[in-house]
Amino acid sequence: MRVVHYLNQFFGGVGGEESADLTLEARNGAVGPGKLLEQLLGGEAQVVMSLVCGDNYAVENQQAMLAAALEKIAEAKADLFVAGPCFQAGRYGMAAGALCCAVQSKIGIPVITGMARENPGADLYREPLFIIDSGDNPAKMRDVLTRMASLAKKLVGKEAVGYPKEEGYIPRGLIRDQFVEQTAAERLVQMVLAKVKGEPFESEMTAPVFAPVPMPTGVKDLGKAKLMLITDGGLVPKGNPDKIQGSAATRWGSYSIQDCAELRGENYEISHGGYDPQFVRQDPNRLVPLDVMREFEREGAIGELCNVFFSTSGLANPLSNTRRMGREMAEKAKQLGIDAIILTST
Amino acid sequence: MQLTLASHPIKELRFGANTRLEGTILVIAEDELHDVALQVPGIESVDFAIVRPGESCRAGPIFDVVEPRAKAPGGSPDWPGILSAPRTAGRGTTHVLTGAAVTLVREQSPGESRGALGYVLEMSGAAAAGSHYATLNHLIVIPHTQPGLPAHAQQKSYRSAELRVAVFLARTALDAIPERTQEFDLSVDESRSALPRVAYVGQIFSRQRKPEPDEQILYGADTDGMLPTLLHPNEWLDGALLPSYHVSLGGAETYFYQNHPVISELYRRHEARELNFAGTVATVASADNFDRERNTRFAASLVKWALKANACVLTKFGGGVPHTDLSETARILECDGIKTAVQVTDLARDRRVESALLFNYPEVNAIVCIGGNSTKWRVPPVARVIAANSGVAEMLAGPFEIESLNVVGVANQQGASRLRSMVY
């Protein structure tokens, strides 16, 4: 097994903060902790190349560093790429994470790294990578490298990878299914009994934490504002021209309401499997309130209503879809000069 | 209230001249079953098939699975509110043909958000291994209803037919000696006063859909306008409840009301003196926030003041929105000092934890998560496809890929599922 190992200037033995501007250097064979890594990987594993780079250089010139490193790793005909462990070192972690991602996607060989959970690189790269939880104490180098080597061997051998607790990696925030011995009911009652007795219990899912969305500034003069209607209730023109899926939709559509005083049921259908659509079918204005908006327009309460509305289906839609579609919609709304949007849901 | 379940294990179903129980063999006379099923308005003709565990067989789309049970005289009636007067369920002796099931297939692909397949019964292979139903001996009921019958009337015929057939079969056990009897009784004495009082709040419908005009869910009522209501656990087990016709609200079958996994587990631990089973509340998931606030507070008040519980487990019914009613009820209970654990289903189509839940209350931190979205099987052609007509049979012929959510029993929402979401 041919291994390429990435180290920062400190672990690469070049120097401390004063050497942080060091450009990427390739050395033959193992350097610093790479020797122990080689030993722990065992068998025929050989660190054929060590890449050493200064922390500042790696972060400030990330694209150049990545390009140079990818070239070297490809030349080395590596079977495995290892970066770090980086412990609490933030710039080191950022560089190691970016490199591992690039190697994984561009060269397609297994990659492994190690970081403390608090390392900013862990936050950014935990989902696409296996990052061994190194803690913040470099004195635990042997222990951390042991776990990195063990998981790396599994990845190279294409063996099944266990759960974070068993393998020691930072949870990636992903889900897979498993059949277990106990029924859901047995697990449920066991969990509540543990909770009521004050004993430890392990929830099978953790609630997401989201960054707060700042409140936008209010519309200064609604009488001059251009408004738009967007819905996730799945209202689409008859025939569903954009083939918006009724569940976990990946697409959204923009539909003209130019010169329409109101929406008429015979022109629309619902692509959304999560609510009873009969009332919206009867009168689509119940979902996309064009009739009322036209009244406001006539009265001068609003400046103007945009001549299209956007629509998608919100049913069972994962955030990775909705986040992207939201950005696309916002971008388009900006192009259309929209001042305010009314979002309607079901 | 005391309920006795008298179990008669069934090892084999066999067609024969007279319907009777011969030890562990249930002999079924088809002509007698015809007479039973044809009494149901709307049913023009009916076929039957027997299916064994492990057999190379597939049936679908499944309308429902029922365990054959019959009430002994003197207790509650059979299926009160549906086949009998709406008297309280859960009293007296019920004879149970354990290991057997009456399973009815629909005549059409149900569509809705479960896809064309609806629910499929797999009796062999990897998909079957995930469902308790693959371990049962099924009598498959294949109805043929009058052409032009509206969907709700058709489904009412299905329901009535499956229940009548199931009761008819189980009546063969009324005079037989059961292999074992099990008592279900909640009495609590002084010696148990230190044990935690644990309640169950179960959703039985979701107002994401209107109930069909004559849909029979709770003692024959359709739940429209229903407020959360106290039920004795025995009522769930003994015929008070049926699942909705709506396929998109699936993951519940009559079989697992009769063998309710949460109620059974609470009873088991009650017997083991690990807890006092305080009782249950049946509730619905709401259609809007006003309804939700009323229902969740109502359910929580019943748990606190009527059941005097200090812990509660909650399950949902239907799709995504019911998660909000579930978690809001749990949050209110937690704020009142009542510890909770909730069971949710898999919503994360992108397999990311951030998409898994529709709530993030810090108090609601004990969560059982049924998996499903990353489990599917490539199922082969089988020796026998059981379906109501050639169109449906063709759809089920195989090979095809089937998601776990479409295999009846795998992602069950009543607590029977062994499929778990694992975070990694």
Image (cartoon, coloured by chain):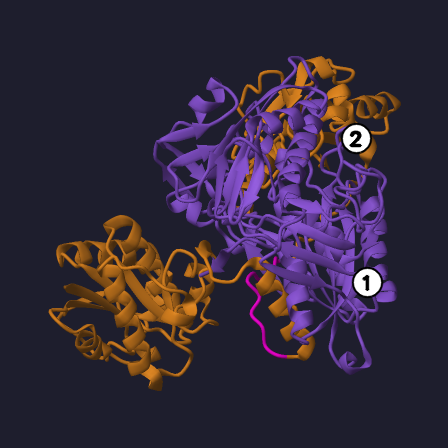
- Say whether residue B245 is visible: no
Tag 2 subunit: A
- Is A1 on the left-hand or right-hand side of A66? left
Residue at 70% x, 13% y is A266
Magenta stretch: helix, strand or loop mostly? loop
Chain letter for the residue marked with disc 1 in the picture: B
Q: Residues within 10 Å of mark 2 (few under 14, many from 20)?
A: some
Magenta part of the chain: A199-211
Question: For this rendering, which residue is in front, A88 or A26?
Answer: A88
Q: Which residue is mark 1?
A: B303
Question: Of residues A152 and B28, which is closer to you in this image?
Answer: B28
Q: Quadrant of the N terminus of chain A?
A: bottom left
Residue B379: horizontal and vertical position, in percent? 37, 37
Q: Position of residue A330 (x, y in %)?
A: 60, 37
The magenta stretch spans residue B423: no
Q: Which residue appears at 63% of the width and 63% of the height? A: B265
Q: Which residue is mark 2?
A: A224
Location of residue A71 in the rendering, given as x and y in whole percent from the top left corner: 19, 54
Chain letter, colour purple = B
Amino acid carrying mark 1 in the image:
Val
User: Which chain has been coloured orange in this picture?
Assistant: A
Q: Nearer the viewer, residue A119 or B346?
A: B346
